[in-house]
Every structure is written in C-alpha cells, then in structure tokens.
Image (spheres, grey):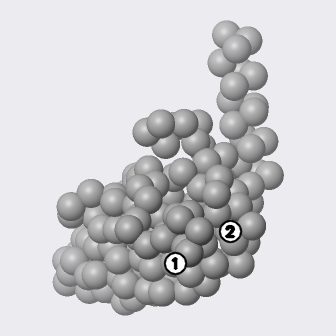
Amino acid sequence: MRATLLTGMLLAATALSAGAQEDDIDPRFGRRMAPAVPAASLEADGSIDRKDFDFGRSIGKAWLARKGELKVDVWVQHRGLLCASYEVGIRFGEGSRGCTDVNWLAPVHWITERRQCNNAIIQHVGVDTDEHIMMTFERVTCAERVVRCSGNCK
C-alpha cells in the first residue's frame, strides 16, 4: 500500500514538474503514445537527425527532428451533429520500452485547431518548431498525441 501511494505521489510530482497539462487531455481519446523509431535521415557524422512515431493506422503519425522541427498527421473523430473545436498537440518524453513510466521533457505543444461537425473524422496536419525539445532530442524515446475539445463535445 505504501509503495502504491509513494508511486502515485512520484508520478504526480513528475507530471507537474514536466509541465503536463492533464486537464487539457480529452479523456474520450485516451492516451495515444508511441515509441521513437529512428528515421532514415542522418547527420553528416552518422547520427540520427529525426525520430518517427506511429500511433496506429487509424490514429496517425508524427516526427521530431534534431533542430526541434516536428510534424503531426493524425485523425480526430467528432461525435454528434452540432459542432465543436478540436486541438491536437504532442509532447515528447523519455520512458522505458513500450512508453511506460514516461518522464515528459516539455509541455504539450499544440499544433492544430479545427472545427468539426456532423460526425466528421478530420485529418489534423501541422508542422512547427518546439524549442523546448531541441536540447533533449537525444533523450526522446516516446511521444503522446493529445486532443482537447471545446464546444459541443460528447
């Protein structure tokens, strides 16, 4: 019991210190984490220049480059006829195999915002630069797709 309580307290402290925004995560979309896979893109010295993340066939993909450039290409399903606004973000961290016990290295970086209606499934694609993650690129082993909704969210 003590170990469970201590583990919970440590996880909460880690989430707060990493700038995690748990209130922003829409529980309907669950946690979609993906382990890093080195991309074919290499630096002149042979080091990896980009890491790819695959959240699953019906969810989408993302990548992160050494200089902080990132791309998100994911799908979001709206439920209902009335409209809502959806934002998609991503955060990067280091964790054990399978992205468990992840220490988030930077806060969620919000990339896209789209208005969705009529049970639409819409592709959210965005490219940006995350300066927080540049210094910790080597440590990144996991990514998490984050979705938040405002308006008529079901």
Q: Quadrant of residue 2?
A: top right
User: Badge 1 local density, few (<14 within 10 Å), some, or many (20+)?
Assistant: many
The first of marks 1 and 2 along the sequence is 1
Residue 76, horizontal then vertical, whole percent = 31, 72
Q: Indicate the quadrant containing the C terminus: top left, top right, bottom left or bottom right.
A: bottom left
- Furthest toward the front, the residue is 45
Q: CA distance from mark 1 to mark 2?
A: 10 Å
Q: Is residue 30 above or below residue 82?
A: above
Q: Which residue is mark 1?
A: 70
Q: How many marks?
A: 2
Q: Can residue 84 be spotted in the picture? A: no
Residue type beneath disc 2? Ile
- Label 1, secondary structure: give it: strand
Question: Residue sitting at 64 percent across and 63 percent down?
Answer: 137
Residue 119 lies left or right of residue 60; in this view the side is: left
Query: Do tag 1 and tag 2 residues touch (Cβ < 8 Å)?
Result: yes
Question: Residue sitting at 68 percent across and 29 percent down?
Answer: 8
Question: Residue sitting at 26 percent across and 82 percent down?
Answer: 122
Residue 74, horizontal then vertical, whole percent = 33, 73
Q: Quadrant of residue 140?
A: bottom right
Residue 18, horizontal then vertical, whole percent = 74, 55
Task: Pick whichever, 138 or 111, lies toward us.
Answer: 138
- Furthest toward the top, the residue is 1
Q: Can residue 39 be spotted in the picture? A: yes
Q: Which residue is mark 2?
A: 133
Residue 82, horizontal then vertical, whole percent = 28, 84
Q: Indicate the quadrant containing the N terminus: top left, top right, bottom left or bottom right.
A: top right
Question: Residue sitting at 75 percent across and 33 percent down?
Answer: 10
Residue type beneath disc 1? Leu
